[in-house]
């Protein structure tokens, strides 16, 4: 399938024979009150931007200057943060979802019917892999809209310990997990940031604390050599993301994560052995 043939939504036959067809919900709920407030109160002060090294402690249990919203730092970094309550969901379900959703484009579209266009893994899943092992170390190539802009992105999932997380604290996937990734362009070997979805159990379900660090000092070419040198000029432009990009990313996450939470417990119960 070529890039130009990819499309939003489902067409006739796309869900024929798919065991998850009934979870296609093209209607999405409005933004939560908290998300609307986060957008209205942003951009926040640059002084509230935490460094990536603080990611392990940003789990919603400690108050920080920026919990919900976005800010642009003086060094050019864009930081986005949003919390999502996920009733009836466990961190282990989130791990399952991240290892399952990129196997077919239709699965990815379930997650955000108005923005997700395509997804595929760059490499096959390791034989016998379960839970976090199904996505850590793999790259998901996705096409999606952020605001009204369609982009192709590369999402390289990394072990949380690479970002300073304590392996022991994440050993029980029913208590906590951290989905961590290096994010970049799909067609150009250039990474522009990191994402972290830190999920912990709460009474009645879980809470996801999502954070993104985009631009300097987190933007860099992938690999090295001549290709990296050719991307220096591109890198300079990416070191200063704009506030409107923060608003688009915040809105996107505030839409897709509650939508996922609305059906994740049910799809997990029915298809968790569908690997």
Image (cartoon, rainbow, N blue to C red):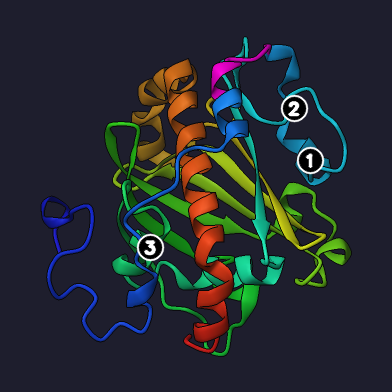
Residue placed at 58% from the left, 22% from the top? 77
Note whether 102 is above or below 76 in the view shown. below
Span colored in magenta: 39-45
Q: Is residue 226 left or right of residue 4?
A: right
Note whether 265 is above or below 127 in the view shown. above
Q: Nearer the viewer, residue 226 or 202?
A: 202
Residue placed at 48% from the left, 73% from the top? 100
From the image, give the main secondary structure of the stretch colored magenta: loop
Pointers 1 and 3 in contact (C-beta within 8 Å): no
Residue 127 point in image, percent of width and height: 52, 88
Q: Earlier in the sequence, mark 1 or mark 3?
A: 1
Residue hosting label 3: 110
Q: Nearer the viewer, residue 153 or 83?
A: 83
Residue hosting label 2: 50
Q: Earlier in the sequence, mark 2 or mark 1?
A: 2
- As drawn, the label of residue 58 is 1
**Mark 2 neighbour density, 10 Å: few (under 14) some (14–19) many (20 or more):** some
Magenta residue check for 40? yes
Q: Is residue 173 visible?
A: yes
Pointers 2 and 1 in contact (C-beta within 8 Å): yes
Q: Nearer the viewer, residue 62 or 242?
A: 62
- SS at mark 1? loop
Q: Is residue 132 left or right of residue 161?
A: left
């Amino acid at each position: 399938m070529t890039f130009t043939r990819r499309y939003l939504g489902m067409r006739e036959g796309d869900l024929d024979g798919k065991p998850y067809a009934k979870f296609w919900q093209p209607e999405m709920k409005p933004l939560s009150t908290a998300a609307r407030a986060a957008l209205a109160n942003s951009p926040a002060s640059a002084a509230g931007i935490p460094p990536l090294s603080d990611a392990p402690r940003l789990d919603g249990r400690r108050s920080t200057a920026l919990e919900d919203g976005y800010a642009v730092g003086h060094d050019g970094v864009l930081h986005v943060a949003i919390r999502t309550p996920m009733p009836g969901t466990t961190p282990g379900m989130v791990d399952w979802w991240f290892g399952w959703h990129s196997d077919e484009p239709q699965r990815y579209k379930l997650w955000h019917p108005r923005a997700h266009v395509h997804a595929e893994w760059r490499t096959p899943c390791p034989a016998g892999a379960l839970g976090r092992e199904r996505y850590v170390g793999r790259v998901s190539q996705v096409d999606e809209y952020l605001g009204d802009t369609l982009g192709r992105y590369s999402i390289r999932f990394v072990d949380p310990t690479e970002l300073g997380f304590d392996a022991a604290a994440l050993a029980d996937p029913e208590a906590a997990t951290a989905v961590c990734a290096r994010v970049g362009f799909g067609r150009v070997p250039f990474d522009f940031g990191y994402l972290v979805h830190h999920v912990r159990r709460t009474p009645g379900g879980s809470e996801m604390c999502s954070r993104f660090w985009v631009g300097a000092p987190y933007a860099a070419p992938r690999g090295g050599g001549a290709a990296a040198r050719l991307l220096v000029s591109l890198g300079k432009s990416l070191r200063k993301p704009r506030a409107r990009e923060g608003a688009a990313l915040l809105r996107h996450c505030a839409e897709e994560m509650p939508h996922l939470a609305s059906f994740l417990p049910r799809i997990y119960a029915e298809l968790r052995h569908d690997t």
